[in-house]
Amino acid sequence: MSMDTVKTKKITLRTADKEEFEVDEAIAMEFGTVKSFLLENPESEDPIPLPNVSSKCLSTIIEYFTSHLAFRGSSSEEDEAKAYNEQFVKAQDNESIKELILAANYLDIKDMLDELTQAAADRLKNKSVEYARRFFGVENDFSPEEEAALREEHKWAFEGVDPDED
Amino acid sequence: MSTNGINKLPDDVLIKILSFLTIKEAVRTSVLSRRWKQLWQFFSGRLNFSREINFDHRLKSDRKKLKRESSRFVERVNKVLNSHQGPSINKLRLGFYLNEDLGSYIDTWIDIALKKKVKKLELINFPFFASELSPYSLSQESFSCTTNHILTSLSIENLGVSDETVKHILSSCPLLKSLEVSESPQLRDPKVLGSSLRLKYLSISDCDFIQSIEVCAPNLVSFKYSGREVPLHIRHVPKLKTLDYDFSWENNYPNIPLAFSELSNCYLPRLVTLMLRMPFERLRLQVDKFPKFTSLKHLICKLTGFNGESLLFLTSMMEAAPFLRTFNLKVDGYNEINKICELRELRTVEGHPNQYLKEVIMTGFCGREADAEIVTYLLKSAFTLERIVIGVWLAEGMPIPEANKIKAENLARQLVENNRPGAEYYFLTNTIF
């Protein structure tokens, strides 16, 4: 082995919109699906296709991990990561959060998925059913009678009065 | 246009999001669409059923009200727990008027939760002042779940728990890391023993009839006791880092050694954080007997019933803790202050050097000579002090007249400027701290 710094291996990822991203192996290995692929095809030099991830999403995710890897090993890693996550999540609008959840789920990135799903839940807190429907892009396929019956069945959940929550 | 994208998410991710909501909010999602109708039944987060009611205890009709509310509470908890289909729940918290009438429900709910791999269980009985209703007493039957459960944290407040039940809980919950029992009149001589106990946090508080406690727990990191001063046989706690003793109840024998002196000399020096709350006279008489606290970084002393004489006995504590980083002194005095000490009247006070003390908080400072003395001592000792915080009042919830307050603040300011000019200082505004 030479005394020169070892060149970090780069992995090429190709997004749904046919853009190619070259990332450090360290970052690529954070993605469960990519990691599995690489373990099964260690010699492959071809770009790895990610048909369910847009370039916008992937570049955001790469940015997230680049920052996180920079904190690793520092003495205030936990605090720095926490502060970063808060800012990161704040900067995403609802559409981006949803897209990122889809991407993180597809790419099998557990920790990021936990962060994002918590963030989605935070945005739904104290919001109406209509808001939740819009957030999730859900069509109401209940008849008015069915919905009314359901609301009656779970009447206690629809009462706003008692301070039940934690 | 609505994105259909999120609908491509598998159910388990939607459930993940749901599980961060409260159970009420999660149940509301049942009306979103047919797909969502039963997703909430896989809720895996924190189930919090807590309902405090405004009772007017003078009214006889309150008993009827309690019966009605109890029925509603039982119905609600049953509905959720019986419909629950998912494999796990993170936490179950029941906060209600958990009297004997609800006993069999409580046992059933605990059983369901344990079977659902609950990690944290909190049972809180709110007091209802009708004398005929006693709090439910948990028993071995309450924790008879035979499937492997993973309970790590249990908190019981104002429910009956006997010594036997504690023993049973410890043996049937092998993964238990945290146990808190408070306000249980049945607790007499609890024994928390076991060479394979994983228990890290133990708290026993306000049990009126307790007579002694025995602890032998190889993994215990933090022990908290509050209530009457009783013999505390703490053996074999090699990992103990935090001790919190609150002996603010009446003690007729201020001269007997403090209960924790039994903690052999090999454990006290390992403590990192120590919190003591007791009548000031009690601490004053015992403070010379402490060993050196060679690992202590954080000390909190709450002294009640201070008569205004002198706090310099605390210097022994400071000398016994050479590596202290923060010191929080809370003084509750009872004598009204008529005269604020003048700087020139202050006796010379020498400090014993402590190079690690960075932060001092003193509350109950009201400009007595005793206050000025101890603050001067601390400022002189802590030659790398960064910050001192002062609460000017007589006792928690008892402010002093504004004119005196201003004089006392000025005195404090002068003390800092004379003795530790580089240090930051500020005054607290709220008397509850």
Image (cartoon, coloured by chain):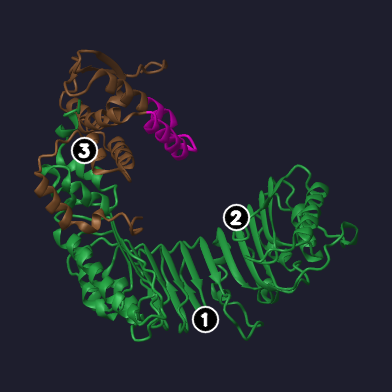
**Badge 3 element:** helix
Image: magenta residue range: A66-91
The disc at residue A133 is 3
Residue furthest right as drawn = B344
The disc at residue B297 is 2
Instruction: Tell if the residue under mark 3 belongs to the same chain as the one under mark 2.
Output: no
Residue at numbered disc 1: B231
Return the x and y of residue B319 as percentages of the image width and height: 71, 61
The disc at residue B420 is none
Q: Residue at the spot x=80%, y=52% of the render?
A: B410
Please name whichever residue, B299 or B155, is drawn nearer the observer in this view of the structure.
B155
Return the x and y of residue B238 as percentages of the image width and height: 47, 64
Residue B172 lies in quadrant: bottom left
Q: Is residue B324 visible?
A: no
> What is the spatial separation of the Cα atoms under label 1 and label 3, in whole angstroms?
60 Å
User: Tag 2: residue type?
Assistant: Lys
B232 inside magenta stretch: no
Q: Residue at the spot x=87%, y=62% of the render?
A: B347
Q: Is residue B277 left or right of residue B149?
A: right
A81 inside magenta stretch: yes
